[in-house]
Image (tube, helix red, strand yellow):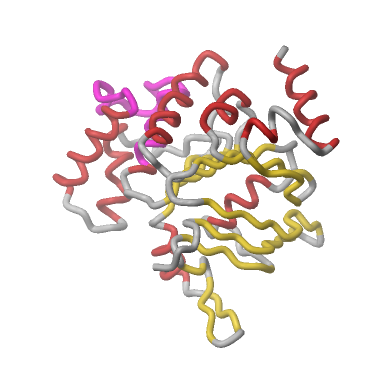
Amino acid sequence: MTDRPLVHAVNVTKSFHHNEVLKGIDLDVEAGQVVCLLGPSGSGKTTFLRCINQLETIDGGRIWVDGDLMGYAERGDKLYRLKDKEIAAQRREIGMVFQRFNLFPHMTAIDNVIEAPVQVKGESKKVARERAQALLDRVGLGDRTAAYPAQLSGGQQQRVAIARALAMQPKLMLFDEPTSALDPELVGEVLAVMRELADDGTTMIVVTHEMSFAREVADTVVFMDAGVVVEAGPPADVIGNPQHQRTKSFLSRLRSEHS
């Protein structure tokens, strides 16, 4: 393997119907790092996350995850789009947790967690179930394995969704505003699980508005606005002592909303 970072994104661009959402994003994430993406709605954070995971096709630039060029094969100086099956294989290595929990409503918590390892990786149900139980224990839901999503609070559903993403043993975890759909009193239980993952050395890219989480857990904070990275660095710099006016006004607006 190269000594390249786990995630290496270079000059990534993406447009939707002539609207340029990403205007040349560069980002490196080392194995074991937590990177928080901050920025106003519409700044391109979620789109960038979806590009890493190949849920969106990039228009320009390149994204490597663990040395693999995502979505493409490079031959000479030409790029060729990978087949859907090959892209799906790349996607298996990346866990993603969405704003909405996207659990299968007709399946219990444990069945939600074992579904992908069994169906996608061909794991035996026994092995998958043992790991699922351990993961549900880890997110504090070991006693709710037989519960259906409708019987769980939003915070519990999101913790099942995290366990489900971890069940594939991904190299990288992506979180797209994982607490934004939750009632305020449930936010803490999901962030606590994410803090633990960070402590365990899980590589994570997190789109969030939770400033205290970004300040305490992130190795790097990236502030995006209008499709560009305005400012990036340690939380103490970007949140504590922002250099750019756009970052300053975003943070002061957030503070006034939360005060």
Residue visible at 43% across and 52% down in the picture:
94
Q: In the displayed orientation, state which residue is furthest to the right.
A: 245
Residue 237 higher or lower than 202, as above or below: above
Q: Position of residue 189 (x, y in %)?
A: 44, 20
Image-based side of 162 in relation to 241, left or right? left
Q: Position of residue 142 (x, y in %)?
A: 25, 25
Q: Quadrant of the C terminus?
A: top right
Decide which of 36, 135 is in the foreground and name it: 36
How many numbered dots are placed on residues in this image? Answer: 0
Based on the picture, tell me whether residue 149 belongs to the magenta stretch: yes
Decide which of 162, 30 is in the foreground and name it: 30
Image-based side of 187 in relation to 95, left or right? right
Q: In the displayed orientation, state which residue is furthest to the left.
A: 126
For the record, the magenta segment spans: 139-164
Residue visible at 73% across and 49% down in the picture:
229
Image-based side of 91 in relation to 200, left or right? right
Based on the picture, tell me whether residue 238 belongs to the magenta stretch: no
